[in-house]
Image (spheres, rainbow, N blue to C red):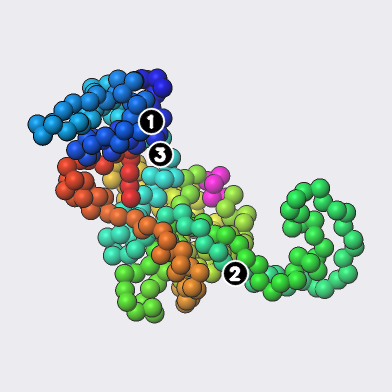
């Protein structure tokens, strides 16, 4: 292990030592950290061995944090800003990039006798290679949806949940690519009562987007207190979240407000690291 590079598991261990009282685990990772001169053993006043980070380790952690902050994509930063400014202050519970199963109604087609198709050399055949009657044998098609931001109201009454999906697009190319996938948009509508696009101002006009979608635009630099403006509200359609969605929400950790994270870190005696946003 080089002193100029720090593998993730070594960086994680150093942060654990920094945040704790320095109690050693006495495992292989600590042997490597000791050999690299990133930590050293010392004896406490009570006679117990403790680990202490060296100046080199502290410098490497600081550098890794800066690299982590810079490596966050524009998409991720817009996503984080929007959640922190528009969703969490309203008391909504917000999740990022969930993986949710949705059931979509298959498009109706005229029944016809399909010709026999050649056997595929793939382990799992491409759907487009299957006969039409086989493709549409099931009334519903199950798909995986990954909304950028999924949120609900913090309420005990199901009729007031108001589930929302916000899709973030950092560029016009990304937005146009998304518009070509109708099934993806239908999946988001199946999951929520309203769907919105969020992107920097100037990327597209509301008239270019599906009329059922709301449109939010970001004014200013994402890293310098941007302002979000609602150009068009979304069409509201009532929906009830199925049991499978609730199970996925139970297993996932919602976002926290930056102020709450800073307060928690202050209570622990350290600052957030590695660009953690919750």
Bounds of the magenta span?
172-176
Residue 212 visible in the shown view: no
Mark seen at residue 28: 1
Residue furthest right as drawn: 115
Mark seen at residue 72: 3
Q: Nearer the viewer, residue 265 or 114?
A: 265
Q: Secondary structure at mark 2?
A: strand
In percent of the image, x 54 and y 50: which residue is there? Answer: 175
Does residue 260 belong to the magenta stretch? no
Give residue 164's position: percent from left, percent from top. Answer: 43, 65
Give the mark toward the camera: 3 or 2.
2
Quarter holding the N terminus is: top left
Of the image marks 3 and 1, the number of the one nearer the N terminus? 1
In percent of the image, x 66 and y 71: which residue is there? Answer: 140
Label 3, label 1: how far apart the Cα atoms are = 31 Å
| Residue neighbourhood size for the residue with mark 3, other residues' Cα within 10 Å, grouped as few (<14), some (14–19), many (≥20) | few
Give the mark toward the camera: 3 or 1.
1
Give residue 151's position: percent from left, percent from top. Answer: 39, 63
Residue furthest left as drawn: 45
Reply above or below: 120 against 3: below
Of the image marks 1 and 2, the number of the one nearer the N terminus? 1
Q: Nearer the viewer, residue 272 or 37?
A: 37
In the rendered picture of this protein, how many numbered marks are placed on residues?
Answer: 3
Give residue 92's position: percent from left, percent from top. Answer: 32, 64
For disc 2, the marked residue is 103
In percent of the image, x 21 and y 28: which residue is there? Answer: 52
Label 3, label 2: how far apart the Cα atoms are = 33 Å
- Snapshot quadrant of residue 35: top left
Q: Secondary structure at mark 3?
A: loop
């Amino acid at each position: 292990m080089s002193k100029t590079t720090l593998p993730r598991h070594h960086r994680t261990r150093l942060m654990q030592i920094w945040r704790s009282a320095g109690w050693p685990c006495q495992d292989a990772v600590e042997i490597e950290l000791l050999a690299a001169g990133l930590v050293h053993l010392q004896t406490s006043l009570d006679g117990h061995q403790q680990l202490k980070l060296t100046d080199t380790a502290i410098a490497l952690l600081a550098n890794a944090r800066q690299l982590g902050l810079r490596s966050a994509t524009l998409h991720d930063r817009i996503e984080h800003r929007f959640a922190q400014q528009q969703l969490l202050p309203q008391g909504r519970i917000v999740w990022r990039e969930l993986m949710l199963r949705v059931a979509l109604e298959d498009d109706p087609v005229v029944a016809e006798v399909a010709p026999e198709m050649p056997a595929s050399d793939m382990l799992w055949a491409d759907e487009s290679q299957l006969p039409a009657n086989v493709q549409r044998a099931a009334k519903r098609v199950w798909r995986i949806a990954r909304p950028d931001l999924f949120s609900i109201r913090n309420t005990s009454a199901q009729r007031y949940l108001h589930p929302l999906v916000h899709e973030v697009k950092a560029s016009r190319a990304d937005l146009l690519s998304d518009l070509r996938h109708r099934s993806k948009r239908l999946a988001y509508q199946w999951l929520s009562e309203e769907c919105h696009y969020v992107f920097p101002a100037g990327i597209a006009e509301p008239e270019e987007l599906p009329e059922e979608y709301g449109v939010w635009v970001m004014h200013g630099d994402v890293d310098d207190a941007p302002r979000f403006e609602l150009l068009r509200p979304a069409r509201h359609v009532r929906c009830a979240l199925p049991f499978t969605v609730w199970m996925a929400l139970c297993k996932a950790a919602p976002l926290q407000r930056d102020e709450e994270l800073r307060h928690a870190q202050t209570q622990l005696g350290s600052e957030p690291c590695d660009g953690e946003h919750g």
